[in-house]
Amino acid sequence: MASILCNLGALALDRADPVAALPLFAQSLTLRRGMHDQAGVAECLEGFAAVRAARGDAAEAIRLLGAATALRARTGASRPASDDGQHAARVEALRAAVGATAFDAAWAAGQDHDGESVAAEALAYAHLESERE
């Protein structure tokens, strides 16, 4: 179920609907945290990053991507090869949007946090956004 929710979030983003994507990623992240599925948590953080990028918050998107990458490195959880191209394109678009210095600072900030604290922040953001809508 957690994987399906994450995939539905990605589909919503493909349809340019970050509002619909956010609660799907949040539900998936909640389930994956409960299962201690670190690869799934990283995938959800990447989804949250895509939502934040779509909403114009490049710095937070970069920080989330940095945290997801660090979590993958710590746990040995690789990104599916089918996602590599889209991930690389998102990273380069964000780097171009904010410049190398700001990108590196936001990326490093994400890598300095553990996956659990970033996941909790992402869920808090999703909760706040759900109250606004």
Image (tube, rainbow, N blue to C red):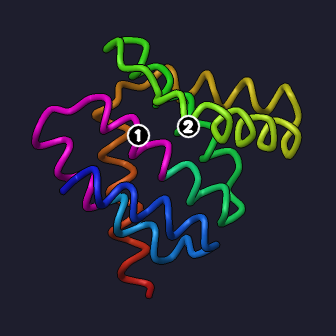
The x, y position of residue 3, in whole percent, is 28, 50
The x, y position of residue 29, in whole percent, is 28, 50
**Viewer-proximal residue among 128 and 26:** 26
Identify the residue at image location x=21%, y=52%. Answer: 30
Asked whether, in this view, residue 7 is left or right of residue 34, the answer is right
Type of the residue with mark 1: Glu
Q: Is residue 20 rendered magenta in the image?
A: no
Asked whether, in this view, residue 65 is left or right of residue 23, the answer is right
- Does label 2 or label 1 sit earlier along the sequence? 1
The x, y position of residue 91, in whole percent, is 72, 36
Q: How many marks?
A: 2
**Viewer-proximal residue among 54 and 131:** 54
| Marks 2 and 1 close (CB-CB < 8 Å) | no
In which quadrant will I find the C terminus?
bottom left
Identify the residue at image location x=35%, y=69%. Answer: 23
Instruction: Tell me the number on the disc at residue 83.
Output: 2
Type of the residue with mark 2: Asp
**Relative to 120, does residue 101 appear above or below in the rendering?**
above
Instruction: Tell me the number on the disc at residue 124.
Output: none
Judged by depth in the image, the label closer to the viewer, 2 or 1, is: 2
Identify the residue at image location x=61%, y=46%. Answer: 61
Disc 2 crowd rating (10 Å Cα; few below 14, some 14-19, many 20+) is: few
Q: Which residues are magenta?
A: 27-47
Q: Circle 1 — which element? A: helix
From the image, give the main secondary structure of the stretch colored magenta. helix
Q: Which residue is mark 1?
A: 43
Asked whether, in this view, residue 78 is left or right of residue 81, the answer is left
Q: Circle 2 — which element? A: helix
